[in-house]
Image (spheres, rainbow, N blue to C red):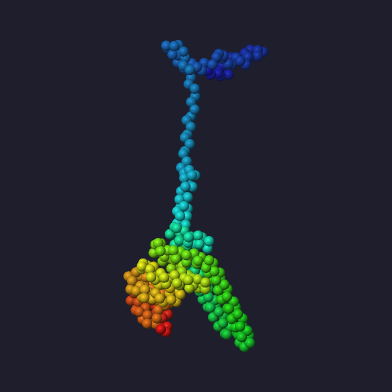
Amino acid sequence: MTKPRFDPADVPDFPKGDKPDPAASYIDVGEDESDDDFPVDPLTGRRAEPEAPQEAPRAEQPRSTRPPWWLVGFTLLIPVAVFFVWYMNWMGRPLSVGTINEYLTSSNDKDVAHALVQIAKQSQDASEEAAGAQRRIDARYKDAREAIKRDKSGQEQQTALKQLDDDYRQSLKKIEAEYRRTYDDLELTFEGVLNFVRNSKSRPPALIEAACGALSAMNKSDRYREKARAELRGLLRSENKVVRRAAACNLANFSDDLGRDVILEMLDDPDANARANAAIALSRVGRQSDAERLKKLSESDPDPKVREFAYQGHSALSGKVD
């Protein structure tokens, strides 16, 4: 073990003129005896070797709790796939004219039903949109006319009223043109509907019921109107009650009362939807004598929807001449 240095104060004084040896203040300790601290093995006579310094243990890296990217992607893909499957099977999904014609020739009942439902829906939507646009224009026209009469007089009033009438007629023409554009597109599918109905004897009644709704969309077509009405009249002879009722109610859109007896029977049906459809159909083909029955239905039916349609039917038939 290394011995400590002597304190310089312990060095003896030298006579004057003698130069002190700088090394004299130190003691030669010889070789490093740092190994003296390690004992000698009594059996081998060897001194124990110092142990190599051990490295400090490395701290373990914390494992990531983040899920792998493929699991995240798969989890996100599930709702997308579910939505896609639902959307592709949704009957409300809009179809192009080409897709409708393709579906009408399909052997898959679901595809055919989708096409038939879309024809009826798109036709109804176009009619309601045109009717709504006309009501808005009528309301604006009425307000503008009253304002002109209130604020203007004489020749200025006449000129303003004439200009207002011209604008009103132009607006109605635009509405009609937009409606005809939609209807003309749908008319390209009517031949496919007629072919389906003529070859639908082996198809499910619910599918033929949907076809009746598509035939009803032809009531404004000069080319297909009479063909569609003839097909609906033929379906009145069906052995299936669902088909007969669908044909009778849709014939009402042609102002055809051949199915009136079937409609009157539906007014007593326990199904509220059947009674509501019957009330709507009877308001179009019924007689003034049927108005009283609709009035009673509007007052006594337990379903509010049926009461509303029955009331509207009664109002429509009250002033009708038999």
Quarter of the picture holding the C terminus = bottom left
- For residue 136, say whether it is visible: no
Residue 86 occupies quadrant:
bottom left
Compared with 100, 180 (above or below) is: below
**Residue 49 percent across, percent down from the top left:** 48, 17
- Residue found 51% across the figure and 76% down from its top: 135
Give the camera-side residue of 73 and 58.
73
Compared with 312, 201 (above or below) is: above
Residue 301 occupies quadrant:
bottom left
**Residue 312 percent across, percent down from the top left:** 41, 77
- For residue 86, say whether it is visible: yes
Give the camera-side residue of 111 and 9.
111
**Residue 213 percent across, percent down from the top left:** 44, 68
Left or right of 161? Residue 275 is: left
- Residue found 47% across the figure and 45% down from its top: 71
- Residue found 38% across the figure and 68% down from its top: 238
Left or right of 294? Residue 181 is: right
Residue lying furthest bottom: 154
**Residue 158 percent across, percent down from the top left:** 61, 85
Compared with 257, 155 (above or below) is: below
Residue lying furthest right: 17
Give the camera-side residue of 188 and 137.
188
- Residue found 53% across the figure and 78% down from its top: 138
Residue 308 occupies quadrant:
bottom left
Q: How many marks?
A: 0
